[in-house]
Amino acid sequence: MVTLLDTDPGLLTIENAILSQKLDETQKRLFYVLADLENLRKREEMEAENRALALEAKAFLPLLTVVDDLERVWEQAPQGAFKDGLKMVLDEFKAALKKAEIEEVPGVGSPFDPMLHEAVGDEEADLPPSTVAVELRKGYTLRGKLLRPSIVKVSKPRAESNPVEQK
């Protein structure tokens, strides 16, 4: 029977080197497999979050039109109990939106951001260039992601008026 002590020490060194190399390769493969698994977990988590966000957006989008309509009616309503009651309903809608983490996109006076605003024209205004001058429809974000862009007109400098000489 051959024992470990009977073998050539040079062969043991070579065998140890081979085993050490195989161990290193196996550890590297294990590291890459674990990294791939972690990336897959993160991707699945993000996709699930995006699916949930899309479902919420689909549910809330029609309510934004209702809020728009309520705001338009409130602006046109004469002073009185009706206007006060309408304001209470509008405030409740806005509180519900806030609770659902729906926020208004910054409007008039804010810098134009093509990721948040949809420009449909420009407007002469005493505002810095590329600033939201007129908001035609409010935009909203849901947990920081755009739900509906604002429709705006962007400021441009006022034209210099040149009086025409009369003859």
Image (spheres, rainbow, N blue to C red):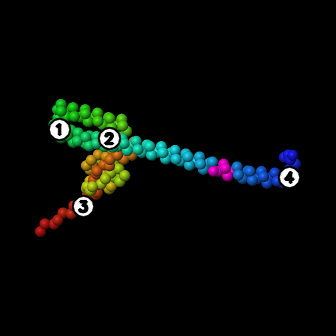
Q: Main secondary structure of the magenta part?
A: helix
Amino acid type, callout 2: Phe
Asked if the residues shown at circle 4 and circle 1 are in contact, with their CB atoms under 8 angstroms apart, the answer is no
Lower position in the chain sequence, tag 2 or tag 1: 2
Mark 2–mark 4 Cα distance, whole angstroms, equals 78 Å
Q: Amino acid at mark 4?
A: Asp
Q: Is residue 138 magenta?
A: no
Q: Report the residue marked by disc 3.
A: 160
The residue segment tinted magenta is 24-29
Q: Are marks 2 and 3 in contact (CB under 8 Å)?
A: no
* Secondary structure beneath label 1: loop
Foreground mark, 2 or 1? 2
Q: Sort mark 3 into few (<14), some (14-19) or many (20+) by Cα contacts within 10 Å.
A: few
Q: Earlier in the sequence, mark 2 or mark 3?
A: 2
Q: CA distance from mark 4 to mark 3?
A: 98 Å
For the point 73% across and 50% down, the residue is 20
Residue at image mark 2: 60
Comes first in the chain, label 1 or label 3: 1
> Circle 4 is placed at which residue position?
8
Q: Identify the mark nearer the N-term, 4 or 3.
A: 4
* Residue shown at the point (28%, 40%) measured from the top left: 63
* Element class at badge 3: loop
Of marks 4 and 1, which one's residue comes earlier in the chain? 4
Between 37 and 8, the one lying in front of the other is 8
User: Residue 56 placed where, x, y %?
Assistant: 36, 41
Give SS at disc 4.
loop
At x 27%, y 47%, the residue is 137
Q: Position of residue 84 (x, y in %)?
A: 21, 32
Above or below, comparing residue 16 to residue 143 in the picture: below
Q: Does residue 127 appear in this view?
A: no
Element assignment for label 2: helix
Mark toward the viewer: 4 or 1? 4
